[in-house]
Amino acid sequence: MKPKRPRIALFGGSFNPPGNHHRAIARWLVKQFDQVLVIPCGPRPDKPSTNEIEPIYRAAMVDMTFRGMEKVQVELFDLERESFSRTYELIEKYEAQGEIWNVIGTDLIRGGANEESVIQREWSSGKELWKTGNFVVVTRPNTAFDKKDLPPHNVLLEIGEKGSSSHIREAIFHGQVVDEDLTPEVRRYIARHGLYRGMHANRTTRFQPDELKPMLVVDDSNPAATKISKKLGMTSHPEPNVIYVIGGDGAMLRAIRKYWRMRLPFYGINAGHLGFLLNESPPPISPGHQLTLHQLPLLWVETENARGEKHADVAFNDAWGERASGQTAWIQVTVNGKEQIPKLLADAALVSTAAGSASYARAMGAQALPFNTPTLLLVGSNVLMPIGWKSAVLPLDSEVKFSALDPVKRPLNGYIDGVFQGVIQNMLVRLSHTASVELVFDPAHDPAEKLARIQFPTQNS
C-alpha cells in the first residue's frame, strides 16, 4: 500500500489586518490537516484595500497573529515579490508535498450549482478547479448559503467567531474599540505605527510597555556582556515582549538575523565599542517613561551561481560581491535595470543600509549616515575604474544588481551581512517588502553623538 499523503490546507487571503477570526479558522484547520500554510497575498487589482498600507506591516502582523500555532506556517513570498499567486499556481507549487485543500468563504461558491460562482466565472482555470479541486468552505455566523452550490470535493467549516478585516479597518479608522477582534500584540502594533487611520504609518514612534518581559540574547564570547548579564540577574520570560541583546553591534546584527521573524522589538545594551544600535544601560521601568522605537527595513538579497541556482536571504547591514582570486574583480553594476557602471574594476562592490553604513561601507570609504536615513549606499572597494569613483547615495526603493563579467578568471564571492554565500554570478539587492526590525532606545540615547565620534575624531581617539 502507498503511504498516506499529508493533507495540506492553503489558507490564503489579504489578512489586512489578520484578526482573531483568522486564528479561529487556523485552530480548526490544525485539527483536521497535517499542515496549514498561511499565504498573505500581494497587491490585488480587485481589492484596492491591499495597497492601503505597506506590505512590510501586513507581513509583521501575520507573523504575530499565527506565531506559536502548531502545524501553522506563514509564507511571505507573494508579499515579498508584490505578486498575487492564483490558486492553481499555489496548487502546482505545493502538490508534490501532499494532498492540497483550498480554504475559501461561502461568498465564492454562490451560484455554483448553475456554474455562476466567482470561482467558475472569474478564477484562472476556475471551471477545472471547481471539478477537481479540494475546498474547505468556511461559513460565517448568520450567513446563509445553499448547499447545492458547494463544489464536488468539499469540507464545511462552521466557525462561531464573527469578524472581518474590512470591519476592523473601518472601526480603527473611526476610533472604535477593536479589543475583541485582534490579538493584543497586533492591536498594540497597529496603535504605535498609526495604521488604518488614513495617514502615513509611523516609522519612529513611542514604546511604553506596562511591563518588560525580556528574551535575553547574550554574547557569551564577550566578558563584558556576561558581566552585565549576571549583574542584571534576569532570565528569559516564557512569553517575551522584547528581545534584550547584550554585547556589541555584531551581537545585535546576529540576533536580528536570527530572530527578526519573532516580530519583537530589540533593545540592545552596549558591551562593545561605539554601539550604534545599542543603549548604554537597561531601560528604567516607571510610570510614564517612554522609549523611542524605530522601525527599520532589511535588505532582500538574491544570489545566483554559475549553474543558475538562486538563493534569497535578508540583510540588516549590507550585501556585497568580492573578488575570489588574486585578480581584480570586473563587475557590471545596474540600478533599477539601467546599467550605471559597465565595468567596475575593484576588489568589491557593496550595497548598505543607512544602519549598516558605519560598518563595512565606512571601511570602504563611504560616509557613515544616521541609522534611520531613508537611503541606500552603493560603495566600491579599492576602485581602479571608473577613476575617482567611490560611492553613491541611492533612493530607498532602488534595486541594485552586481554581475561578474569574467566569472572564470575573475570570480566573485558573495556575502550577506558577512555570511559567505559561495561563488556568485549575480547578486540582486533591494529593500525587503516583508523583513523589518523594531529597535528600541532610551530617550537619553543619542545616535548622532556616536556618529560624531567617528566623523570628528579627537586627538585621544
Image (cartoon, grey):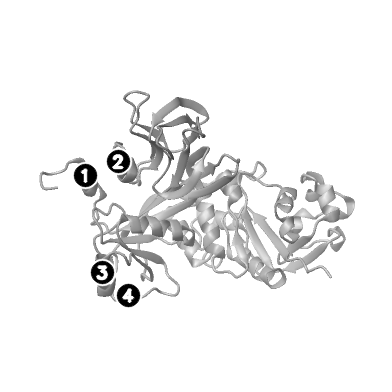
Q: Secondary structure at mark 1?
A: helix
Q: CA distance from mark 3 to mark 2?
A: 29 Å
Q: Is residue 289 above or below residue 378?
A: below
295 relative to 98 in the view: left or right: left
In x, y percent, where is residue 155?
Answer: 79, 66
Between circles 4 and 2, the one closer to the viewer is: 2
Q: For the residue marked with disc 4, what is the amino acid? A: Met
Query: Pointers 3 and 2 in contact (CB under 8 A)?
Result: no
Tell me the kind of residue under disc 2. Answer: Arg
Q: Tag 3's secondary structure?
A: helix
Q: On screen, 109 above or below 319? A: below
Kindly identify which residue carries mark 4: 234
- 145 versus 355 height, above or below: below
Mark earlier in primary sequence (3, 2): 3
Q: Secondary structure at mark 4?
A: loop
Farthest residue to the right: give it. 114
Locate residue 99: give its quadrant: bottom right
Marking on residue 228: 3
State which mark lies toward you, 3 or 4. 3
> Disc 2 designates what residue?
362
Residues at circles 1 and 2 in contact by the CB criterion of under 8 Å: yes
- Occupied quadrant, residue 243: bottom left
Disc ID at residue 9? none
Kindly identify the amino acid type of the residue bearing the numbered disc 3: Ile
Query: Looking at the rendered structure, which numbered label has been put on residue 454?
Result: 1
Gap in angstroms between the C-alphas marked 3 and 4:
10 Å
For the residues labelled 4 and 1, say whether their Cβ atoms are less than 8 Å apart.
Answer: no
**Mark 3 burial class by Cα count in 10 Å: few <14, some 14-19, many 20+:** some
Sooner in the amino-acid sequence: mark 4 or mark 1: 4
